[in-house]
Amino acid sequence: MTPPDKPRLRFFESAPAQRHITGADHYIYAQAEPRHRVNVIGTGTIGHEHMRVATMLGRVAINGIYDEQAHSMDVAADTFATYSDSELKRFDSLEAAVNDPAADALMICTPNFTHIDVLEVAAKSGKPIFLEKPMATTVADAKRIVEIASDYPSFIQVGLQYRYKAPYAEARHEALERGTVGDIKTLAMSEYRPPFLDKVKQWNKFAECSGGTLVEKCCHYFDLLTLFAGGRPTRVYASGGQAVNFVDFEYEGKPCDIDDHAFVIIDYDNGVRANFTLNMFCPHFYEELVVCGDKGRLVASERFDFQRDDSARSHVSIEMGENGASREIEVGYTKPIEQSGHNGSTFHEHIEFADQLDGKASDAATPLQGLWSIVIAAAAQDSVASGQPVEMNTFVEQHGLDGIL
Ligand SMILES: NC(=O)c1ccc[n+]([C@@H]2O[C@H](COP(=O)([O-])OP(=O)(O)OC[C@H]3O[C@@H](n4cnc5c(N)ncnc54)[C@H](O)[C@@H]3O)[C@@H](O)[C@H]2O)c1
């Protein structure tokens, strides 16, 4: 029998020349029975990804789904049937989905503005919860989620999975565990990408529903910067706006009001200075993190030209000058894992989720880290609006976050 968490040879098991190997002869292809069952709330783009990735990992079975749009559930069920022959329950209310005794965990994958209300209902079940990022659209709702989590009988994991992208996982290992570049002094992160995709009822075109671009998308990068900085943000200054995307877009008579570019500067209390650049009117995806310490420089990058390449190309380059060995590393996960979603980071997020369900230690994002990512983003959005820097002590006090942050 195969041990439950043993890595599998996913390339071979799905190869055409291996299809004649029946389950009875599976050993290195064998999949242990999942030990947990999850109900997925919200079966849109990311709900699909979680269903597929959970099934691929095989440690948590998809037990059932609930979505307020029947069409989303139809598509999710049809897609699920292409890669799984397990039964999939469909629930007709949120309450029925979260209180189903057959599910021992829940995944909340609904739009940002619904997270707080869905979580309030889900939390009554006391079950372990995975909650997509950003946790909430406002600092007040994010604070409420931290309060719910503080005396929750189980865990709440937040979907900030970019920390598991191969270049950043490797950068964390080099810069934070091995201390390769010495004491970190500056961080520069950037994301260049195409515009936001279409969504159900176009919720991501409106700051009221998404929290604003820096909250909705860039919470991932503020989470990463804070992990690398290892300090507390003291000051945030930002400039940004809507230059190209959706300038003529209207939905039910309402014009789109989301930014498509921004520059953000964050000072941390340990002297680390960070900046973040966003541009959302580019032909393909390019992300970069530059970490400079007193011994060297590290550059972690991911390029994904979805129109030409079938996988992302990720590198970590370490430049040590006279202080040590410099090197250039190509990093990545196996192709099926990278292609399962967000270049393999979602797969690794699911390993953390399954580990937490099994009672193991995990470095998955917590509600407190989710709150920090929103607080930095919200402060940056305030700075864009006012043209002034935001002092974080004042911001924390104004939002009643003393004692929490
Ligand atoms: N971690 C990541 O990298 C990542 C990537 C994409 C999306 N997300 C997050 O996932 C969430 C969903 O995004 P998406 O891209 O899948 O959006 P989507 O519009 O594609 O799907 C959302 C689904 O939720 C359903 N829904 C809306 N309100 C609901 C409610 N109250 N109860 C049940 N179902 C409801 C919609 O009908 C839709 O099917 C958002 O919070 C988004 O920010 C995270």
Image: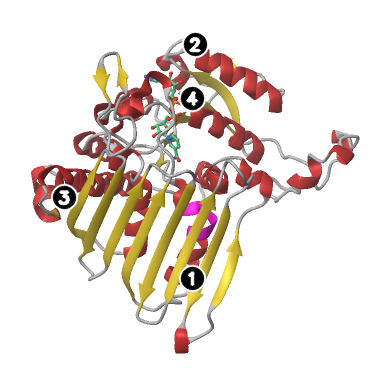
Find the distance from the CA under tag 1 to the CA under tag 2.
46 Å
Q: What span is in magenta?
A: 163-168
Labels 2 and 4: the sequence-earlier one? 4
Which is more toward the observer, 113 or 210? 210
Q: Secondary structure at mark 2?
A: helix
Label 1: few (<14), some or many (≥20) within 10 Å?
some
Separation (CA) of disc 2 from disc 4: 11 Å
Q: Which mark is residue 70?
A: 2
First-in-chain label (1 vs 3): 1
Mark 3 CB in 8 Å range of ligand 1? no
Percent across and percent down for residue 131 are 40, 35
Q: Is residue 208 left or right of residue 81?
A: left
Q: Is residue 27 magenta?
A: no
Residue at image position (30%, 20%) is 250
How many tags in the picture? Answer: 4
Of the residues shown, which amino acid type is indicated by label 1? Glu
Viewer-nearest of labels 2 and 3? 2
Residue holding disc 4: 44
Q: Nearer the viewer, residue 95 or 249?
A: 249
For disc 3, the marked residue is 403
Q: Which residue bears the numbered disc 1?
A: 174
Asked if residue 322 shows in the view, the reply is: yes
Measure the C-alpha gap from mark 2 to mark 3. Answer: 43 Å
- Identified at 46% across, 17% down, the residue is 67
Dot 3 amino acid type = Gly
> Neighbour class for label 4 at 10 Å: few (<14), some, many (≥20)?
many
Report, in whole angstroms, how far the alpha carbon at label 4 lies from the one at label 3: 36 Å
